[in-house]
Amino acid sequence: MKMTPAFVIVGALLVFWASAFIIVGIPSLTMKETPSEIWRPLTPLEARGHRLYVENGCSYCHSQFIRVIDWGIGAERIAKAGDYVGIEPAILGSERTGPDLSQEGGEHSDDWNRAHFLDPRNTTPISLMPAWDFLSDGEIEALMAYVQGLGGKAADLRVKRQRDWKRQAVAAYAAGVDANIEWLHGQVPEVWRRMPNPYPATEAALQRGKRIYQQLCINCHSPIGDGNGPAQPHLSPPPLNFTILRRHLVENRYIGGIFYYQIMNGITGTAMPYFKKHLESEKIWDLANYLAVSFVGYTDANTDPRGIDASYEGGWVNRYLPPAVTPGR
Amino acid sequence: MTNLFRKPQSASLAFMVAGAVWFVVGAVYGMFSAIHLVAPEFLPHVAPLVFGRERPVHVNTMLYGFVGTMLTGIGLHYVPALLKTRLWSEPLGWVTFLFWNLTVLSGPLGFAFGFTQGREYNEYVWLADVSLVVAVLCMIVNVTLTIMHRREPQLYVSIWYFVATFLWTACNYPLGNVMWHPATGAMPGLIDSIFLWFWGHNLPGLLITPLATGAAYYVIPRVAKTPLNSHTLSLLGFWLLIALYSHIGGHHVLQSPIPSWLKTISVVDSISMVLPVSIVVINLWLTARFVGGRVWSDPSARLVMAGVVWYIVTCIQGPLQSLPFLQRVTHFNNWTVGHAHIAMLGFGGYIALGAMWHTLPLVSGRPVYSQRLINLQFGLITFGLTGFFIVLTMAGLVQGTAWYNGETVVRVLPQLIPFMAMRAALGVFILSASIVGLFNVYMTLRGAKEPEALRRLEEAT
């Protein structure tokens, strides 16, 4: 085959356009823009937030499609073609240095998002995300509106739930610290309010709990558990001061099950997210023991009711039981 | 000044020097990005230096600025040289230089302040897109007319690649960048990901690959002092490249809801890419057979040959990771980042640097200031990049397998710290390599002209 100039030029272009027709031409002719069941158009503020998302390169760390193999936040809803109608550009992303955001809307409260944008380590101490505090307040609000709208109609339901519960949580906090705790405990199902921590609070377990506390909790609840971490000024109601729980013993003990339930499910409406996708059973119970021992002073670990101890648990004696008379009451 | 723009080979030299400068700029931004993945609060509150803005500067400056620019400069030398003529118009070469580099410059100047279209590898804003297309069109005119005025009847394989690169880019770039939508540079909806990855993969595939292949085809036989092994293999490699490469962008969105037939084509043609790549590599290796010592003992040809090795590594890994089964753990994480680095810096960058060191004396009439500094650059970059590849692949496997087994993205972050720290440390080697290279280029051009090199230059043109 003799490669003459005309042959090279015409041939190269012909093969290129034939290929291009298959790979972009046919999709352009056949792919239809049909909205999915959760799709809705962006509001003007959300559209502005989307521009900011694109211009600031959020897509280099956050993908926007859930795959069939995914776990974690949003994994309940696999991405569909109709989720992206009219978004220009709908950047699917190629990296997950941070979590997928396609279903992020309403996963966290507005306060959480604001604190997170100003400094991601406010809410997630191990985050690698840059702080966006150089953006104007208006820009942060636009970004928040966009993120809270990710997931379309499904996100709207979640956001509504967040805002409804926020009203109640703020009212409870306004009623005073002890009333607030009564309200918080009232939201925990009865079975959990009687359940002692089934894991022994051994030194090793407390160390594990401490590590989780430092990775996920410390910048809201603070190193001494008084709720005055760096995120506190941005949050309403503010993070819980664990030390107050000493005044709320039930039957002379503080219940591990309450901690477990609230770490697991979070407190929707407040900045307290759920951790049930991040942490499994032992990690949450270890964390609950760490909170109880460090900030309340007591834990009900391994107290009755209890069944057969796991094989490694025999012989552990709970040194963190309260004295017979409850202090302060 | 007008004399400068008419001086034979001046545009070629300008492209090569610019490439060496962009390498340093790109490496600095890469360094900052790497540090930010270990220490997100390094240089806080500096808006132009947040990860989301510095990463596109790094990527685009390396792709278009370093590798693309340097390889173009090399082509501007070998095209007239292989045709036994001069570039049709040196001033037009400079116009190309101006518009091409304006586009590259719009990266650090624009992205840092949010002027970006935000689509990976398609980030340049519309005006910069126009500037790049103008540069490409000027190049097509210049090269075509150079071919018309040739004094050598046969077109050597490097010429095919060089001409075709710019023909393809002139069609490819406006299409993938959706230039008929100037405001966003994007199509609405999911189909945008198909346009985006059409150019996203054709950028390495149909811009960098043919340029680098052309340069390797130029340097290896010259240094080996043997004719090219096989014309037939050259033909096969060339036509299979264009027939297959443009189909494979879909493997970047394989797990997304794009049409299944498109995924199938992407995977099948990705696997088929092993063919043209092996053919090119085998052709080059067989050319250097029995005279490997000659190639390996020449510091610039060693870089080119090592680039060819990275090429085969990249293009065996690439097809494999397009397989849906493997992508379950390799997609969305640092595995891909490792792959991107051996492709662009390993394959494209090594060949660009090696061919640049080979061509620089032919263009400037001055011997390279220091062969030992080329060796130093080779050592630094090889240590840095090999380390990168290992560390990032490991990090990717940690992320991918953890996610696949149910760990959340946030929980895996602490596990990445040692890998990201090593990656930043290895980045220092690559940054140093870029600085050593720029210093060597500077000292070469400052040095005295050598009659011997001048004579070779005359022979070449």
Image (cartoon, rainbow, N blue to C red):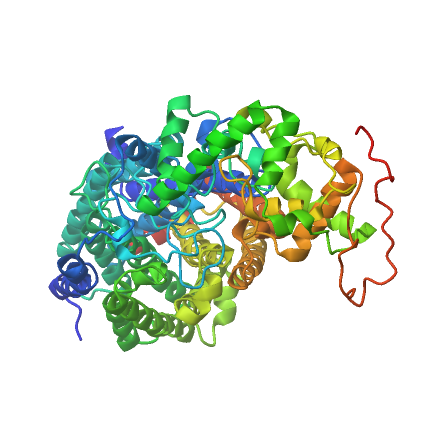
Residue A123 lies, in percent from the top left, at: 56, 36
Q: Nearer the viewer, residue A41 or B320?
A: A41
Query: Is B200 placed above or below B324 here?
Result: above
Q: Quadrant of the C terminus of chain A?
A: top right
Residue B233 lies, in percent from the top left, at: 30, 75
Name which residue lies at 18% across and 65% down.
Answer: A22
Name which residue lies at 58% across and 24% down.
Answer: A175
Q: Nearer the viewer, residue B27 or B420?
A: B420
| Number of marks in the rendered image | 0
Residue B338 lies, in percent from the top left, at: 49, 57
Q: Is residue A15 left or right of residue A143?
A: left
Quarter of the view holding residue B117 = top left
Residue B336 lies, in percent from the top left, at: 46, 58
Query: Is B271 placed above or below A233 here?
Result: below
Q: Is residue B360 left or right of residue A288?
A: left
Query: Is A46 placed above or below B335 here?
Result: above
Q: Nearer the viewer, residue B21 or A168?
A: A168
Name which residue lies at 74% across and 44% down.
Answer: A290
Q: Is residue A301 left or right of residue B386?
A: right
- Residue B381 can be seen, yes or no: yes
Q: Quadrant of the N terminus of chain A?
A: bottom left
Q: Nearer the viewer, residue A139 or B57?
A: A139
- Residue B88 can be seen, yes or no: no
